[in-house]
């Protein structure tokens, strides 16, 4: 039996921070108390000397690019970056090559992750205009959710047949995760930009092309259809203030049928940053105005927005150096998401307890994750040790994602992740990922 004792921690859990020790046997938290003594001489003791200890983050939206796009990233490379960012569990998206739209391709990803992943893993199944029977016949016991793209993005898995969409909403019992942008609006706006700029569309036109109305039209229709059919939906990466009015905070999360998420980049950047960052902040949906950003913050803090995620979606620097029409949307974020949110804690924009709620507890609740996302006796020992007063600067030399760049390059974060503990093992310590792998497949309590 492997034993681990974490001493002198400031434990952040369930909207409280308390001083205490955490004792782990094998992969499970066995005891949490004010003070715990080592149970035997072979107990590994980590004295964190008053640093914060958080539950491991559950990132419900990542694109790790394997199979088929491994020049951008792999399950191995991107999960290593996730561990360095305190993300101990992830749900990966289906827009790979081939697309994860059937059980065979889903199982292939699970097999790759079983040997290559540094973090706990789950893979969403993707819906299309013609795979409903495949979805209904799949064993969904280990599938976190069904992913639908209601607007085209990398990999183009667009579901644009409204009759099919209603059948999916009516019949699928899994939570349905949605990328919401109205395709017709985007096409019209893109043509207008081409008419004005030709092939040289400036990057700052991205939020004009993929504008507020494109997002709101799609997300409002999805919410309306969910209410009609009873489908449980989770709207990914809100980017507009207008959309936040579609969501409520009048129910306990466990009873919410319609939920939402915001991503790090929509909380950090705004359209004024295109001049400085260019394609490095080109995402779908687009980073929009500072006013939209503030509305997102309001909705996050009052619980209309339930989850903070990354939408980690790496592309190579060469790809991101292309002109607007050829430049893919997306960027790497898993390594820097938690440090970025802790920067907002330093600014008194949000509490560290609220960060943990949105990045750890709520994803676990929404997706029925079994025994992760909280620091509790009997739960898996996925833990993150954070020094909130240990500044470091993001450079290309310390980026772990395979693409080798970050939209946060040059930013000095005040908080540093010193340890990531995965299933009771030290998987990361002070900028070094343990070459051994301790990941497990995420299981669900359904």
Image (cartoon, rainbow, N blue to C red):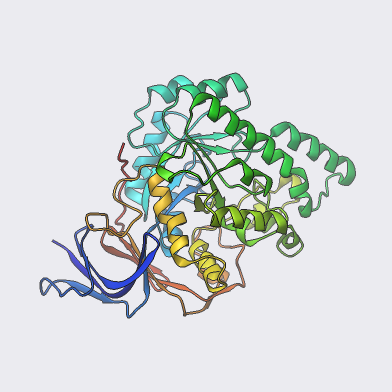
Q: How many marks?
A: 0
Residue at (53% x, 73% y) in the render? 346
Screen quadrant of the C terminus: top left
| Spot occupied by residue 227 in the image (x, y as percentages of width and height) | 54, 29
Measuring from the top left, give residue 430's x and y in whole percent. Answer: 40, 74
**Which of the 4 image quarters holds residue 375?**
bottom left
- Seen as rendered, the residue at the extreme front is 250
Above or below: residue 152 compared with residue 329: above
Which quadrant: the N terminus?
Answer: bottom left
Q: Which of 53 and 189 is in front in this view?
A: 53
Name the spot of residue 305 as percent of width and height, x first: 54, 49
Q: Name the one closer to the observer, 104 or 333.
A: 333
Q: Quadrant of residue 86?
A: bottom left
Residue depicted at x 27% and y 55%? 380
Q: Which one is nearer the viewer's eye here, 201 or 243?
A: 243
Who's the residue at 49% across and 51% down the image?
307
């Amino acid at each position: 039996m492997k034993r681990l004792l974490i001493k002198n921690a400031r434990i952040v859990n369930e909207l409280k921070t308390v001083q205490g020790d955490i004792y782990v046997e094998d992969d499970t938290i066995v005891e949490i108390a004010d003070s715990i003594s080592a149970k035997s001489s072979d107990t590994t003791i980590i004295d964190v000397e008053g640093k914060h200890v958080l539950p491991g983050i559950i990132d419900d939206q990542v694109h790790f690019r394997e199979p088929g796009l491994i020049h951008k990233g792999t399950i191995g490379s991107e999960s290593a970056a996730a561990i360095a960012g305190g993300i101990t569990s992830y749900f990966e998206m289906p827009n790979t090559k081939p697309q994860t739209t059937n059980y065979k391709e889903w199982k292939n990803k699970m097999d790759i992750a079983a040997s290559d992943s540094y973090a706990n893993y789950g893979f969403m199944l993707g819906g299309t205009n013609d795979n409903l029977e495949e979805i209904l016949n799949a064993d969904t016991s280990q599938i976190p959710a069904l992913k639908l793209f209601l607007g085209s993005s990398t990999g183009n898995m667009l579901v644009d047949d409204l009759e099919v969409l209603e059948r999916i909403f009516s019949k699928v019992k899994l939570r349905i995760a949605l990328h919401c942008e109205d395709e017709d609006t985007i096409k019209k706006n893109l043509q207008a930009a081409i008419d004005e700029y030709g092939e040289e569309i400036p990057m700052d036109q991205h939020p004009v092309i993929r504008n507020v109305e494109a997002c709101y039209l799609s997300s409002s229709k999805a919410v309306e259809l969910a209410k009609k059919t009873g489908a449980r939906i989770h709207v990914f990466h809100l980017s507009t203030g207008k959309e936040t009015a579609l969501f409520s905070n009048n129910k306990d999360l466990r009873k919410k049928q319609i939920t939402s998420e915001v991503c790090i980049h929509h909380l950090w950047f705004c359209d004024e940053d295109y001049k400085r960052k260019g394609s490095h902040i080109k995402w779908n949906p687009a980073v929009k105005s500072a006013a939209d950003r503030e509305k997102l913050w309001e909705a996050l803090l009052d619980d209309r927005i339930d989850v903070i995620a990354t939408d980690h979606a790496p592309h190579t620097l060469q790809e991101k150096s292309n002109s607007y029409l050829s430049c893919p949307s997306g960027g790497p974020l898993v390594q820097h998401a938690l440090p970025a949110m802790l920067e907002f804690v330093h600014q008194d924009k949000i509490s560290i307890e609220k960060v943990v709620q949105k990045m750890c507890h709520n994803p676990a609740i929404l997706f029925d994750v079994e025994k992760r996302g909280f620091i509790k006796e009997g739960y898996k020992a996925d833990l993150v040790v954070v020094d909130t007063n240990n500044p470091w600067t993001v450079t290309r030399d310390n980026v772990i994602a395979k693409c080798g760049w970050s939209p946060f390059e040059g930013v000095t974060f005040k908080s540093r992740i010193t340890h990531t503990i995965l299933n009771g093992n030290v998987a990361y310590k002070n900028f070094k990922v343990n070459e051994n792998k301790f990941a497990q497949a995420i299981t669900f309590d359904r």
